[in-house]
Image (spheres, rainbow, N blue to C red):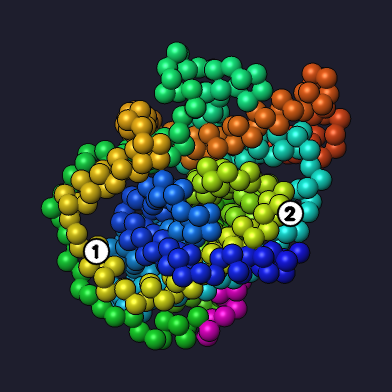
Amino acid sequence: MFLELLHAGIPAYFSFANLFFTAVGVFIGILIGILPGLGPLLGLTLLTPMAMNLNPFTGMGLLLGIFVGGTAGGAISAILLKIPGTPIAAATLLDGYPLAQKGKAPFAVSLAITTSAFGGIIGGIYLIFFSPLLAKVALKFSPPEYFALALTGVLCIAVVSKGSTIKGLMTGCLGLLLATVGMDPFMSNFRFTFGTVALSGGIGIVAMVIGLFAISEMFLQVERGDFDTSPHLKVFFPPISAITENFKQRFNLFRSSTIGTFIGALPGAGSVIASFLSYAVAKNSSKHPEKYGTGIPDGVIATESANNACCGGTLIPSLTMALPGDPCSAMLLAALMLLGYIPGPRLFIQNQDLIGGIFLAYISSNVFLLILGLLFLPLFVMFLNVKKKYLIPVILILCAVGSYGMETSINDLWITLIFGILAFIIQKFNYPLAPFVIAKVLGPIMEENFRRSLIMSGDHASIFFTRPITLGILIANFILLFITIVPVKQLLGRSKN
């Protein structure tokens, strides 16, 4: 089936406009990714309104480019400044920064970029092969199974989020509640609009996410200060040895990319877990584990190949079952919905050209990452020297333009500001934001399939417990939630007593 998808996607995707916007997305993604505290999610939210005005192939190419570039860009500041541009690059610090301190900064940064590109390509190959297979299985699912899967997505992201599981569940429930604002999809009644016309269409996902992640981060940056500080980094050019090092360590590259892909396919796991797990596996299987953490290329290859391959992994459940694994894949799903497509297995039957185009756009993004990442590396290093007092106003203006541009409504600006203040406050109390976004995207899917299930059963909830697959998923959810809230060590301690 994957050959059919590629055959349909090749003529639809390969045009100058599509390739150009994919390359632009990668370039913008790297720029945003290298700035500490920002990351690919900000780029996705800011550029989604622009993507909606393009054809689906061009728009998704732009967003996938930002996704890939932003994921890889965080390694540059992690290696040079010991400050990860994104949490994804935290594991790269372990060997990347010590390697740079040995006087090999050009090699370390170039190695991170090339490894990310190769890892992403391997993840893309897995995506192309496994997505159609999973889509065939998902085609056999009905509303009860989809409801259970959507519930799994919310629970997984809640239990693995930073902070306590209870706090993750609370923000997830708040996201589900906000997903009900607007028109009832079955009864055509308005819910929780409080007589306000602006809320009749629901709360816009783009305006909300810009407030949650971009505006709140700007508030945090202002609170931290240091507006005039600059690292004064020296500009350098990438050495060719960074590319050849990947071929010397091809087994490490392939193993770490495989781990990253399959961790990414697990809802809620994400690139952070993938990169640290790959680093641990590489260290434990090495003949010289004591060298890890002292600045060796092996550690950089293990982490960077895993986190970019993880991007391909997150797209597998996102495209086949509408089950996003992280906020970035949730935004990509939201973009597909805004373009008029319903994510899920039927896309693989009804819109083969789109799915094939997405596959090719993801692979192309990693190829452009390799080319542009090395070609413009001196520019990216110079960009790190820009002071905060110049960046913050520009980003705030872009946030306002992105929020307003989606629906050309002043109400979206108020939504962005309100959610920015809300996110700033709840982060002070260590509440995670990721479950909020995932729940907002999955909320309509959960509600629609829950109510369809009740219609199928004549309003009997027994339909969720008499279908084996649905029951199995719900039991797995209960076990996951139970062992997270009540740690295994605590259970063992009680049994001994």
Q: Which mark sits nearer the N-terminus, 1 or 2? A: 2
**Badge 2: few (under 14), some or many (20 or more) residues near its Cα, within 10 Å?**
some
Identify the residue shown where x is 31% and y is 73%: 377
Residue 105 sits above or below residue 493 on the image: below
| Alpha-carbon span between mark 1 and mark 2 | 44 Å
Q: Secondary structure at mark 1?
A: helix
Q: Nearer the viewer, residue 15 or 345?
A: 15
Indicate the position of residue 458 as horizontal and vertical percent values. Answer: 83, 19
Q: Is residue 160 visible?
A: no
Q: Is residue 30 left or right of residue 364?
A: left
Q: Quadrant of the N terminus?
A: bottom right
| Residue 396 visible here | yes
| Residue 328: % across, % down | 49, 49
Where is residue 168 drawn, in percent x and y?
51, 34
Q: Based on the picture, tell me whether residue 323 belongs to the magenta stretch.
A: no
For mark 2, give the secondary structure: helix
Amino acid type of the residue tagged 1 in the rendering: Phe
Q: Which residue is mark 1?
A: 383
Stretch of the chain drawn in magenta: 247-257
What amino acid is at disc 2? Ile
Q: Quadrant of the C terminus?
A: top right
- Residue at image x 53%, y 58%? 57
- Determine if the magenta segment contains residue 248: yes
Q: Which mark is residue 470?
A: none
Q: How many marks?
A: 2
The front one of 379 and 476 is: 379
Q: Which residue is mark 2?
A: 349
Q: Nearer the viewer, mark 1 or mark 2?
A: 2
Residue visible at 54% across and 70% down? 14
> Residue, x 83% and y 24% (percent of image)?
457
Q: Residues within 10 Å of mark 1 (few under 14, many from 20)?
A: some
- Percent x, y for residue 24? 39, 64
